[in-house]
Image (cartoon, rainbow, N blue to C red):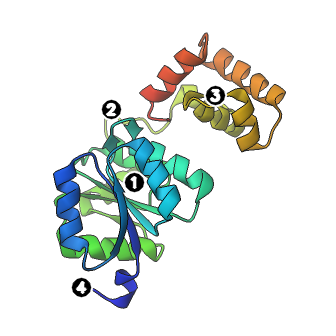
Amino acid sequence: MTTPATRSVRVFLVDDHRLFRAGVQAEIGQHVTLVGDAHDVDTAIQGCRATRPDVVLLDVHLPGGGGQAVIQAVHETHPDVRFLALSVSDAAEDVIKVIRAGARGYVTKTISPDDLVTAIGRVHQGDAVFSPRLAGFVLDAFAGDLPPGVSSEDPELDQLTTREKEVLRHIARGYTYREVAGRLHISIKTVETHVSAVLRKLQLSNRHELTAWAAGRDLL
């Protein structure tokens, strides 16, 4: 199972269950290079940015927001980091959310240690990896034929421009207008204009309502 290619892959593990993290580390620690672990969104973002792993094994449901929040935040500063979702959930909605956020694959926690190491290696090489049943969800999403109850679009979010979505996420995460301006390389006045447009389009009154709206859609 171990090859020089997989042994050199630097892996960061994110899961809110300490015993599960310990189990994964014990099973794959001899086959990849583990560089850190985290139990929630904030520590995951900080840890990934500090260690710059090749592949992040990421649970979907985490304290402080969904796994997609980690992907989006890390990709802002380290776009080359690759994510492989490792979750107990096999719900189509969970799969589609993290793939849209930028994950390269999604496997369930029933996967064997050997197969997990193989999946990590493939994601590191640029492949997309899915547990067999889950691959169908992704294909259906692109074909526009999703299971009942899973929406392929968010009509409210689709009202916003790409820049408005970027501003929304930063404001919802607690950044000041000045900080958002600096991170996006735009003026404070432009940030104010985008925030006003977002609030108007979403029919919200203030940033607190905006944050709640974003949290409800796992955009933080």
Alpha-carbon span between mark 3 and mark 2: 21 Å
Q: Residue at x 33, y 32 (%)?
A: 149
* Kind of residue sitting beneath label 3: Gln
Q: Residues within 10 Å of mark 1 (few under 14, many from 20)?
A: many
Q: Are marks 1 and 4 in contact (CB under 8 Å)?
A: no
Q: Earlier in the sequence, mark 1 or mark 2?
A: 1
Q: Residue at x 70, y 35 (%)?
A: 179
Alpha-carbon span between mark 1 and mark 2: 15 Å
Q: Which is more toward the observer, 13 or 105?
A: 13
How far from the left and from the top, in percent, is residue 178?
Answer: 74, 31
Q: Residues within 10 Å of mark 2 (few under 14, many from 20)?
A: few
Q: Residues within 10 Å of mark 4 (few under 14, many from 20)?
A: few
Q: Earlier in the sequence, mark 1 or mark 4?
A: 4
Q: Which residue is mark 3?
A: 159
Q: Which mark is residue 1?
A: 4
Instruction: Establish if 15 lies above or below 182.
Output: below
How far from the left and from the top, in percent, is residue 123?
Answer: 41, 70
Q: Which residue is mark 1?
A: 138
Q: Residue at x 33, y 37 (%)?
A: 63
Secondary structure of the residue carrying tag 3 is: loop
Q: Residues within 10 Å of mark 3 (few under 14, many from 20)?
A: few
* Kind of residue sitting beneath label 2: Gly
Alpha-carbon span between mark 3 and mark 1: 24 Å
Q: Residue at x 24, y 72 (%)?
A: 28
Alpha-carbon span between mark 1 and mark 4: 28 Å
* Kind of residue sitting beneath label 1: Val
Q: Are marks 2 and 4 in contact (CB under 8 Å)?
A: no
Alpha-carbon span between mark 4 and mark 3: 48 Å
How far from the left and from the top, in percent, is residue 147?
Answer: 32, 41
Q: Which mark is residue 149?
A: 2
Secondary structure of the residue carrying tag 1 is: helix
